Amino acid sequence: MAATTDPPTRALDSVTGISRKGLPQGTVGVLGAIVIGLSVCAPAYTLTSAVGPAASEVGYQTPAIFLAGFLPMLLVAIGYRSLNSAMPDSGTSFTWASRAFGPWVGWMAGWGLIAATVLVLSNLAGIAVEFLFQSIAIIANDPSIADIAGNRFINILVCLGFMTMATVISYRGMTSTKVFQYITVTFQVAVLIWFIIAMFIGAADSANTEGRMPELSWFNPLEVSSFSAFAAGIAVSIFVYWGWDTVLTMGEETKPSKGRMSTESKAAMILVVLLVVMYVGTAAATVAFAGIGDGPTGLGNSKIAENVFAALAHPVMGPAAILLSLAILVSAMASINSTAISPARTLLAMAHYGALPKPIKKIHPKYKSPYVALMWSSIVASVFYAIMRFLSEDVLWDTITALGMMVCFYYGITALASTWYFRKAAPKEGFRSVMSKMVLPGLGGVLLLVVFVQTTIDSMNPDFGSGSSIGGVGLVGIIGVVVLGLGVVLMFVQSRFSPAFFKGKVLSVADATTDTSNMELFDDGIKG
């Protein structure tokens, strides 16, 4: 394949060893990528799921833990940007870690991304079910309707319906997805801003006995009582930021950039800044209005922890509570749709390079979507949710915490991949390059892996998370170990059927100075 006329950082050629996979090119601009990224992060859904678990760990320092969670995200984003400029590829973490550390580490990085997405897809569908029935209850003025979501069989059935609907939309390709996201993102962000302002006003109301005006100590991570609480809080806060990297998986589908930075890199950096402002502001407003007590709307009430905004909607917004309920519903629905982009493209890349069975890499001839990978993502997420709904009374809370662990795992590996890949080239380019390509991503990667190890150890305690356990071992810890263990098993099984990839013959280990044209470029996928 001849090199394109795009800027050098956008070229897909034999120097990087990266090859195209049949995805449509030039269909998404900066604004479109930001909108899709916001949809994946789903602020309304994310916050109703995460504020409770975060507050249960760090109390009034919830805004601080969201702020602290932004730091490793920023450091990782810098590393992602550098790697994406050097090797734009839909496989992101999988491809980059394979090039930096070898096929085995790369495979596990890809597995971590896929596992995290399966966890969140199941959680998204669960939240959508909760708010569907709550919205109906508000419209019908019958609170008992909201309780229908507690019926396991109805809950699972409706959840599968949401997954099917989102899969059909994604199946029709990126253009269909983008239009759907513009509408839903605009609505949910507008309502969320209204909700935040109303909470600050309510916190200052003398009639609100739990209300407190924000204090500077709420934004100080050093006020957190212990490192274990800090690590658990960081794992939850990482969850709220998780999803911005989906923008980078669209590197083969974005429009060419006129500047030095690629379209998807610009979108990713803008997105991260927007998220931190929105999340820290919402956390401060929620803590200020509700407090951390165990009352009906207190953040210390374990009964509302996994879905805080459901309890706060009417006290904060009164008759307009239906708008918040609908905003979270469409937020979850849109995020199911857009979140499926990331694992589908990672699965596509892994199959394309021979790390997974070849049939997974099929692209729909009409819609140009990785439809086989998309189907597998949706099916596995649906089965996982159904199983978890029977194992845990607080399935949403437990999956959020386990998700945070998976994100720390693969983000940490990816950030360190930047440090290692550019270790020889960056010093020759100057101090700025050393900081942006090595030092800062390295710090972010180490921090996230430390949080991953600490949280994994703590999650074995049956009191961790919601308190669900099996055989005296915390359910969150079991989820984490089983998911990663399953990845190791599947990796060894696949290595028997695809030895070329695992011997480094497809994506060979290299660094930014030694990368040469010894990699074959295939237009139609990996041969042999």
Image (cartoon, helix red, strand yellow):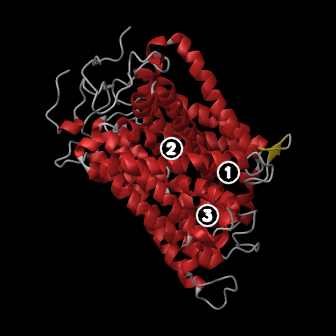
Q: Residues within 10 Å of mark 3 (few under 14, many from 20)?
A: many
Residue type at mark 1: give it: Leu
Q: CA distance from mark 3 to mark 2?
A: 23 Å
Measuring 49% from the left and 20% from the top, which residue is drawn there? 356
**Which quadrant of the rendered structure holds the N terminus?**
top left
Foreground: 472 or 256? 472
Q: Judge from the rendering whether residue 12 lies leftward or rightward of residue 475; answer left or right.
A: left
| Number of disc labels | 3
Residue 210's place in the image compared with 485, above or below, is below
Q: Residues within 10 Å of mark 2 (few under 14, many from 20)?
A: many
Where disc 1 sits, the SS reads helix
* Residue 26: image location, x then y, percent: 24, 39
Residue type at mark 2: give it: Gly
Residue type at mark 3: give it: Val
Residue on which the image places disc 1? 396
Measuring 40% from the left and 57% from the top, which residue is drawn there? 272
* Residue 47: image location, x then y, percent: 56, 61
Where disc 3 sits, the SS reads helix
Residues at badges 1 and 3 in contact (C-beta under 8 Å)? no
Residue 412: which numbered mark, if any? 2
Residue on which the image places disc 3? 51
* Residue 210: image location, x then y, percent: 69, 82
